[in-house]
Amino acid sequence: MKIKIFCTYFQAFPIFKSEIIEPIQAGSENSKFDLGILKDNTGENISHRNFNYGELTVLYWVWKNYLKTFPDDGYIGFCHYRRFMNLDKKPVFKTFNCIEQKKFINFFKKSTQIKTDISAYDIILPMRHKMKKSLKEMYIEQHSTPEELELFKNILCDKYPQYIPYIAPALNRKAGYHCLTFLMRKNLLEDFCEWSFDLLFETEKRSDWTTYTSYEKRRTPAYLLERFFNVWIDYQVGEKGIKVLHRKGIKIIADFTIKQKIIRNLLFLIPSSKMRKRFRHKYQLQY
């Protein structure tokens, strides 16, 4: 069974490529640089709309081009040049692991194959990220476009009323899947893309994204789909009985400085867990 995972790039960064990992440059149409990898501006594409759609231009390209060229692929996935899933057989202990860039490069060289049997599952996802606030509250707080969230929700209710029972539970949950990192069966990906871009393009028709200048606002469609991906997943599980396998997420961070390494090695001397947490945050010691 063939597996292909597309790794999205926006800027210069170590290129991760293997038999199953395919790096691809998002927003290639208007980019000022060439990363020397696959691009999202060939065939049928929306690369020129990357300013708003972000990495979704890659999702669209794969849907409209790659899936037609390679119809026999069993699983298709997406990751980000700094966010991956650990598909090893090791048990899951944490929501995600932060790992320094140099360490991940070494890890990637030794782990270029999927070591977990996924044939019994329909979708492989990183564990839900736990939060102090709900998905809806976090969206409004971080992106300040509650009217867009309501618009997208109303369009979803109109076009796909069967999803209505799953909207509130997903958006009010204080945990969620982020960054659209996943691996799923090809037929499910086709369904997800059809659903996603039908809703996004209709939302775009009824909105004026040209007034948004900050990064948090102009990427509204990408952030909307990240949140409503949770609704789509809940519906697939609840109505279609798809089987989900959760694995540990991996976030690549900058290599620690000497100062950071010293502080990290001395954290055990601090008796208070709250104080240790403050030090980790202050000195960006995410793991």
Image (cartoon, helix red, strand yellow):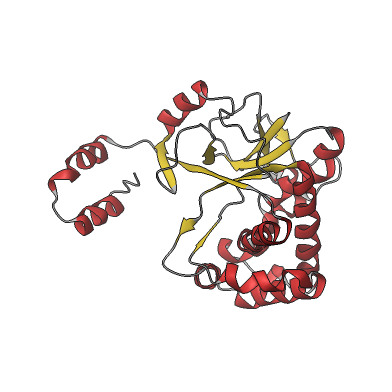
Residue 250: image location, x then y, percent:
48, 41
What residue do we see at 82% from left, 47% from top? 45
Q: Is residue 211 visible?
A: yes
The part of the image, by quadrant, that contains residue 146 is bottom right
Q: Is residue 1 above or below residue 183?
A: above
Q: Is residue 60 visible?
A: no
Report the side of 9 relative to 138 (left or right). right
Q: Is residue 260 above or below residue 239?
A: above
What residue do we see at 73% from left, 49% from top? 57
Between 190 and 18, which is closer to the camera in this rendering? Answer: 190
What residue do we see at 51% from left, 27% from top? 108
Residue 39: image location, x then y, percent:
73, 37
Residue 102: image location, x then y, percent:
42, 29
What residue do we see at 81% from left, 55% from top? 194
Residue 276: image location, x then y, percent:
22, 52
Q: Is residue 133 above or below residue 264?
A: below
